[in-house]
Amino acid sequence: MIMVTGATGNFGRPLVTELAAQGRKVRALTRTPERAELPAGVEPCDSAAPDFAGVSALVLNIAGAPGSTAALLGAAKAAGVRRVVTLSSLLVATDGEAAAEGSTAAIHRDLEEAVEEDFEQWTHLRPGGFASNALQWKAQLQAGDVVHGPYAGACTAPIHEADLAAVAVRALLGDELLGLAPSLTGPQELTLAEQVEILGAVLDRPLRYQEIGPEAAKAAMLAHNSWVQEEMIDSLLSFLADTVGRPALVTGEVERILGRPALTYAQWAEANAAAFSALA
Ligand SMILES: NC(=O)c1ccc[n+]([C@@H]2O[C@H](COP(=O)([O-])OP(=O)(O)OC[C@H]3O[C@@H](n4cnc5c(N)ncnc54)[C@H](OP(=O)(O)O)[C@@H]3O)[C@@H](O)[C@H]2O)c1
């Protein structure tokens, strides 16, 4: 049995869907097991009272267990869980050593260390920005054609969560990623303004990105992500500021691990176009 935290989220949903499609037993943690609408065969479980009976592997996502990862890892160890796949962050690879307390890099670095301390079999997935971050623009794009956000020129290589999930499946079911922490990105460098342009082309709408100041952006990001702390947003904004005018890291690790090209931002936009229509 594989337990997945954050199972209804951007990363967790494609992951549990793929695991179920492969016939694996999956226990999906959620705050609302009664209405989680999970794929057939996936067992919902209250994230406030995780049931580790029969669990051999855990997928750990801070978003699904804010403030309780230590307790979760302790319970997993006591229950004899053998393997942990951590959803970490590329920022651990780029900024982990010198990261300020409370920053995104430090939080994920500490999580990785806690996992390594207690479990022999581990893999840390270190993704860069998710393509699904575009969902934070959903309300704006349902209301009009302008996205207001920080740093129009911030440049990253967004990863499609289906690719991240596919790598997680490899880490759970095979041994080739044990003891590794792959840095995972999408295949193309894109500024935030270019991401909105691609979204516009896919949606056949004249979308444009309008830059706003970091304080206004911070307030919007806090409202969109219920589990994040202010320090995390500050570090993310400062990361975005640093990427302006610089080439983004494109690692090629997704293609190397999966043996096929990484999915593009346009493919993500096509798969998620319905989310941005006025009725979604
Ligand atoms: N976004 C990025 O660009 C990026 C880049 C690198 C790393 N990461 C890392 O990826 C993780 C986020 O993954 P994600 O986008 O898949 O997460 P998510 O979709 O934001 O959240 C996952 C699930 O967590 C549950 N949840 C949300 N708030 C909660 C709370 N306050 N208490 C308990 N459960 C809560 C929700 O499920 P229920 O409502 O069903 O309980 C939600 O579906 C973070 O660790 C982040 O640092 C993100």
Image: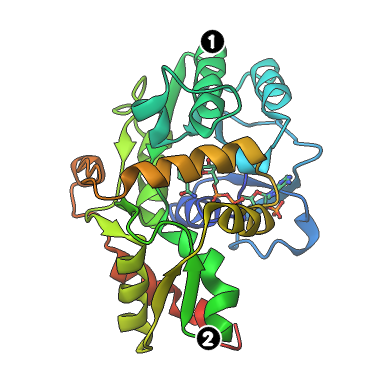
Residue at disc 2, secondary structure: loop
x and y percentages locating residue 117 in the rendered image: 54, 10
In the foreground, 139 or 219: 219
Q: Quadrant of the N terminus?
A: top right
Question: Which mark is first along the chain, 1 or 2?
Answer: 1
x and y percentages locating residue 102 in the rendered image: 61, 27
Q: Give the side of residue 69 with respect to residue 142, left or right.
A: right
x and y percentages locating residue 260 in the rendered image: 18, 53
> Is any part of residue 167 visible from this angle?
yes
- Label 1 crowd (10 A; few <14 / some 14-19 / many >=20): few
Number of marks in the rendered image? 2
- Label 2 crowd (10 A; few <14 / some 14-19 / many >=20): few
x and y percentages locating residue 243 in the rendered image: 32, 45
In the foreground, 216 or 257: 216
Asked if 166 appears above or below 176 in the picture, the reply is below
Residue at 68%, 58% (x, y): give it.
Answer: 223
> Which label number is shown at residue 144?
2
Residue at 60%, 58% (x, y): give it.
Answer: 216
Residue placed under numbered mark 1 in the picture: 117
Question: Which quadrant of the view contains residue 280?
Answer: bottom right
Q: Give the side of residue 252 with respect to residue 241, left or right.
A: left
Residue at 55%, 20% (x, y): give it.
Answer: 110
**Please, what is the three-letter code of the amino acid marked with disc 2?**
Gly
Question: Which quadrant of the view contains residue 202?
Answer: bottom left
**Please, what is the three-letter code of the amino acid marked with disc 1?**
Glu
> Is any part of residue 2 visible from this angle?
no
